[in-house]
Amino acid sequence: MYLSIVIPVKDEVGSLETLHMEIQKSLKKLNLEDYEIIFIDDGSKDSSWEIIEKLSNLNNKVKGYKLVKNYGKSIALDFSFRKAKGEFLITMDADLQDDPEEIGNLLTQLKTSDCVIGWKKIRHDPLVKTVPSKIFNFTCRKIFNLDSHDMNCGLKGFKRKAYEKLMIYGDLHRFIPVIVNDMDFQYLK
């Protein structure tokens, strides 16, 4: 399989069908047919799982996994990395803030890098999220000597050799660029 797209889901019922449609449009523009879309429901309390089941019934390239409770984004991602079959893997958030049109750009950059980290230049979050994010990114750049704009952006791309070796838990999803860099993989911010 060429591409796995991994989407952790926590109470995103209102965005899943639109996200699926936008991913389909983007992949069609790229003439990409060898892919899978993995939705991992991380203990949603809304009807996200029912939407995932519906999408899976409509599109045999959609796979859904449901965790019995909310374990957190790191566990959901780690679980999905173990299920993915693609030579390349792209992660994106389910809240429609990551643009599926960027899939092509990530795949292009993965020709010369093992990991690519996206950057949410324009965020649609309240200040209580954006200000701590800026502080976190600044602090991480200084402590870990990484020139990354957005360490915690949900939009990331990996070659298989990189994502298979990642083991993330707790809040380590926030530090994937640091982990990849420490593993001596070619990292492009």
Image (tube, rainbow, N blue to C red):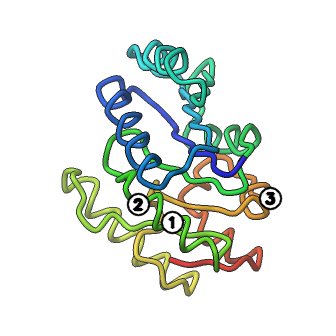
Q: Residue at x 40, y 49 (%)?
A: 26
Query: Mark 2 — residue?
Result: 102
- C-alpha span from label 3 to label 1: 20 Å
Q: Residue at x 41, y 39 (%)?
A: 94
Eye-nearest disc, 3 or 2: 2
Q: Which residue lies furthest to the front in this view?
A: 31
Q: Residue at x 55, y 70 (%)?
A: 116
- Crowding at dot 3, Cα within 10 Å, few <14 / some 14-19 / many 20+, comes out as few
Callout 1: SS: helix
Query: Mark 3 — residue?
Result: 165
- Please report contact status of discs 3 and 1: CB closer than 8 Å, yes or no: no
- Residue 56 lies left or right of residue 130; in this view the side is right
Give, as a three-letter code, the residue at label 1.
Answer: Leu
- Residue 27 lies left or right of residue 76; in this view the side is left
In depth, the one of 183 and 30 nearer the eye is: 30
Query: Mark 1 — residue?
Result: 106
Callout 2: SS: helix
In depth, the one of 45 and 108 nearer the eye is: 108
- C-alpha span from label 3 to label 2: 24 Å
Q: Where residue 173 appears, x then y in whole percent?
A: 58, 54
Q: Where residue 180 appears, x then y in whole percent?
A: 68, 70
Give, as a three-letter code, the residue at label 3.
Answer: Lys
Callout 3: SS: loop
- C-alpha span from label 1 to label 2: 6 Å
- Quarter of the figure with residue 160: bottom right
Say above or below: 19 vs 135: above
Q: Where residue 49 appears, x then y in whole percent?
A: 49, 17
Give, as a three-letter code, the residue at label 2.
Answer: Glu
